Amino acid sequence: SFLSYPSPLTAEQVGKVGKMMARSLPFLPALFACMLISTVHAYLPIVFMHGVNGSPHDFDGLRQYIAEHHPGTAMFALDVDAKEESLFKSMDAQVKDFVAALREVTSVNITGPYHLVAHSQGTLVSRGGIEEMSDHRVQKYITLAGPQQGQYGIPPMVENIVPGVTRDFAHDVFYNAIAQDCFSIAGYWNDPRYHDTYLKEVVFLPHYNNEVNTSDSARYKENFLRIKEMVALGSDGDDVINPWFSSMFDWYTYEEDFHQIDMTETIVYQQDLYGLQTLDKRGSLTRHTVPGLKHMDWLGKEVAFETVLSYLD
């Protein structure tokens, strides 16, 4: 085979081409506009999942900021288990609702990959959903102030629900079947002094962390590693996530006299239980701390919006 090249144009053919180009000039602006629209719509769609006691409207400010800086981005905030339901429904039930809502949105509105942005408790709900879905197409998974390793501190909204409960005695309240079914926070309450009880009684987090080996463990890890990249954002000023560094995957040693340890020293990471170490070693995990932000600042402050936008494409 060989490459063939066309013969030179005749004078008559050159004249015809010139006339055709002259007639097309008025349509050039429209052509350039189409090219611009194609460029604008190059951004991947984004799905948002709200946090505890939140709603889809929590992301209104962030969505507006993204729309201004990445015009044409398709964005969908899931309307699932909002407000009180996020507090009084089990985490397992919320994961099922999340999966159903995500599949509905993506089947109707998104044909290819998309980014997933989740806040607060929604980071754990969405991670559970990711681990359940062998068909998810999450490109970049961005978590805002999420209790990645669990919670070991009483947030204000829980103090209102269970008056008088303290961190030291919350395990008596949360480590039982009734609480696991009725209070979402019970599903990820992680008292470092009672690790064996946590593994035995807590239904949600040990399960999706693969700290308890089940027939689902291999599937959960495989599905989690389907994400292309994860970005964990958090702040030392968080007034809800306790300890705040749970957002960074750091945690405590499991003993009476516990102390903080880095993510890389945790059992979940060292044993690569659900793929966190694999994600990190393939260069697909970013941990980014923004100093001084309160929990809800991620949904309202420009510095938070700038940080999120810097990871979107």
Image (cartoon, rainbow, N blue to C red):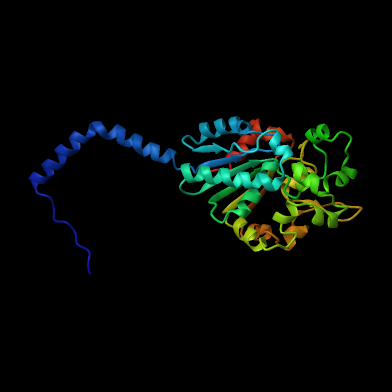
- Give percent across and percent down for residue 150: 76, 48
Query: Would you place residue 81 above or below residue 270 in this image?
Result: above
Report the label total. Answer: 0
Q: Residue furthest left?
A: 12
Q: Residue at x 81, y 53 (%)?
A: 201
Residue ranking furthest to the bottom: 1
Q: Residue drawn at (19%, 62%), measured in percent from left and top?
A: 4
- The answer to whether residue 253 is seen in the rendering is no
Residue 193 visible in image: yes
Residue at the far front in the pictured view: 178
Quick check: 274 left or right of 309?
A: right
Q: Residue at x 66, y 59 (%)?
A: 275
Residue 310 left/right relative to 111: right
Q: In terms of depth relative to the viewer, which is nearer, 93 or 22?
A: 93
Residue 204, how many percent across, how many down? Answer: 73, 51
Q: At which x and y percent is residue 122?
A: 67, 42
Q: Nearer the viewer, residue 180 or 74?
A: 180
Write down the quadrant of residue 299 in the picture.
top right
In this rendering, the answer to whether 255 lies above or below 95 is below
- Hey, which quadrant is residue 1 in on the image? bottom left
Expressed as whole percent of the image width and height from the top left, the position of residue 85 reads 69, 36
Looking at the image, residue 253 sits to the left or right of residue 69; the answer is right
**In front here: 281 or 9?**
281
